[in-house]
Image: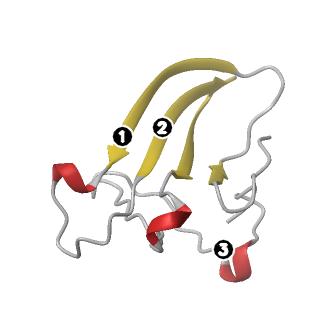
Amino acid sequence: MRRCIPGLAMYVVLIGSASSLQAAMISMTIDPMYGSTENTGATGLIEFSFVEDGADDLLVVAIHNTTPPSIGSKLTAVGFEWPTSLSLPLSFASGGTSIYFDEI
Protein backbone atom coordinates (compact mmCIF):
# COMPACT_ATOMS: atom_id res chain seq x y z
CA MET A 1 0.00 0.00 0.00
CA ARG A 2 1.15 3.56 -0.63
CA ARG A 3 2.47 5.83 2.09
CA CYS A 4 1.55 9.48 2.41
CA ILE A 5 4.08 12.31 2.16
CA PRO A 6 2.74 14.77 4.78
CA GLY A 7 1.34 17.96 3.31
CA LEU A 8 1.76 16.84 -0.30
CA ALA A 9 -0.49 13.89 -0.94
CA MET A 10 -3.32 11.88 0.45
CA TYR A 11 -3.83 8.33 -0.69
CA VAL A 12 -7.11 6.56 -0.49
CA VAL A 13 -6.54 2.89 -1.20
CA LEU A 14 -9.11 0.15 -1.31
CA ILE A 15 -7.77 -3.25 -0.22
CA GLY A 16 -5.27 -4.75 -2.69
CA SER A 17 -2.79 -7.59 -2.79
CA ALA A 18 0.57 -8.49 -4.30
CA SER A 19 -1.18 -10.58 -6.96
CA SER A 20 -3.20 -7.61 -8.23
CA LEU A 21 -3.04 -6.61 -11.88
CA GLN A 22 -2.85 -2.89 -12.61
CA ALA A 23 -5.21 -1.62 -15.31
CA ALA A 24 -5.91 1.85 -16.69
CA MET A 25 -5.26 5.10 -14.80
CA ILE A 26 -7.29 8.29 -15.17
CA SER A 27 -5.76 11.59 -14.02
CA MET A 28 -7.77 14.74 -13.24
CA THR A 29 -6.16 18.13 -12.71
CA ILE A 30 -7.77 20.67 -10.36
CA ASP A 31 -6.62 24.15 -11.29
CA PRO A 32 -8.15 27.65 -11.11
CA MET A 33 -7.46 28.10 -14.84
CA TYR A 34 -10.34 25.64 -15.44
CA GLY A 35 -12.72 27.72 -13.29
CA SER A 36 -13.06 28.26 -9.56
CA THR A 37 -15.90 29.80 -7.61
CA GLU A 38 -13.72 30.67 -4.60
CA ASN A 39 -10.60 31.83 -6.50
CA THR A 40 -8.26 30.52 -3.79
CA GLY A 41 -5.55 29.38 -6.19
CA ALA A 42 -5.60 25.81 -4.81
CA THR A 43 -4.46 23.09 -7.22
CA GLY A 44 -4.47 19.33 -7.09
CA LEU A 45 -4.14 16.09 -9.00
CA ILE A 46 -6.50 13.12 -8.60
CA GLU A 47 -5.50 9.73 -9.99
CA PHE A 48 -8.00 6.89 -10.37
CA SER A 49 -6.41 3.46 -10.87
CA PHE A 50 -8.38 0.32 -11.55
CA VAL A 51 -6.94 -2.94 -10.26
CA GLU A 52 -8.04 -6.52 -10.85
CA ASP A 53 -7.56 -8.78 -7.83
CA GLY A 54 -8.86 -12.25 -8.60
CA ALA A 55 -12.63 -11.93 -9.07
CA ASP A 56 -12.66 -8.41 -7.56
CA ASP A 57 -12.24 -5.10 -9.37
CA LEU A 58 -10.80 -2.44 -7.07
CA LEU A 59 -10.55 1.33 -7.38
CA VAL A 60 -7.50 3.18 -6.02
CA VAL A 61 -7.87 6.95 -5.65
CA ALA A 62 -4.76 9.10 -5.01
CA ILE A 63 -5.41 12.78 -4.20
CA HIS A 64 -2.35 15.06 -4.38
CA ASN A 65 -2.38 18.63 -3.06
CA THR A 66 -0.13 20.51 -5.53
CA THR A 67 -0.88 24.00 -4.18
CA PRO A 68 2.31 26.04 -3.65
CA PRO A 69 2.65 26.88 0.08
CA SER A 70 3.65 30.44 -0.83
CA ILE A 71 0.08 31.41 -1.85
CA GLY A 72 -1.35 30.55 1.58
CA SER A 73 -4.14 28.34 0.25
CA LYS A 74 -4.77 24.57 0.37
CA LEU A 75 -6.82 21.96 -1.41
CA THR A 76 -9.12 20.89 1.44
CA ALA A 77 -11.71 18.57 -0.10
CA VAL A 78 -12.70 16.64 -3.19
CA GLY A 79 -16.21 15.25 -3.73
CA PHE A 80 -16.76 11.81 -5.24
CA GLU A 81 -20.22 10.42 -5.92
CA TRP A 82 -21.02 6.81 -6.84
CA PRO A 83 -23.55 6.27 -9.62
CA THR A 84 -26.98 5.43 -8.19
CA SER A 85 -26.90 2.14 -10.12
CA LEU A 86 -24.19 0.85 -7.74
CA SER A 87 -25.65 -0.47 -4.52
CA LEU A 88 -22.42 -0.50 -2.52
CA PRO A 89 -22.21 0.02 1.23
CA LEU A 90 -20.69 3.40 2.13
CA SER A 91 -17.81 3.71 4.57
CA PHE A 92 -16.78 6.88 6.39
CA ALA A 93 -13.34 6.98 7.98
CA SER A 94 -14.03 8.98 11.13
CA GLY A 95 -10.78 10.31 12.55
CA GLY A 96 -8.84 9.48 9.39
CA THR A 97 -8.57 5.72 9.76
CA SER A 98 -10.53 2.67 8.67
CA ILE A 99 -9.91 -0.84 7.40
CA TYR A 100 -10.56 0.44 3.86
CA PHE A 101 -8.32 3.52 3.75
CA ASP A 102 -4.53 3.69 3.93
CA GLU A 103 -4.42 7.28 5.20
CA ILE A 104 -6.77 10.26 5.15
> Which residue type carries mark 2?
Phe
Q: CA distance from mark 3 to mark 2?
A: 19 Å
Q: How far across and down, in percent of the image, does residue 56 sit? A: 62, 32
Q: Is residue 25 above or below residue 29?
A: above
- Which tag, 3 or 1, sits closer to the chain's start? 1
Q: Are marks 1 and 2 in contact (CB under 8 Å)?
A: yes
> Which residue type carries mark 1?
Met
Who's the residue at 41% across and 34% down the image?
27
Question: Residue 28: which disc?
Answer: 1
In depth, the one of 85 and 103 nearer the eye is: 103
Mark nearest the camera among 3 and 2 is: 2
Query: Which SS class for mark 1?
Result: strand
Who's the residue at 48% across and 74% down the image?
72
- Which tag, 3 or 2, sits closer to the chain's start? 2
Who's the residue at 40% across and 57% down the image?
87
Q: Residues within 10 Å of mark 3 (few under 14, many from 20)?
A: few
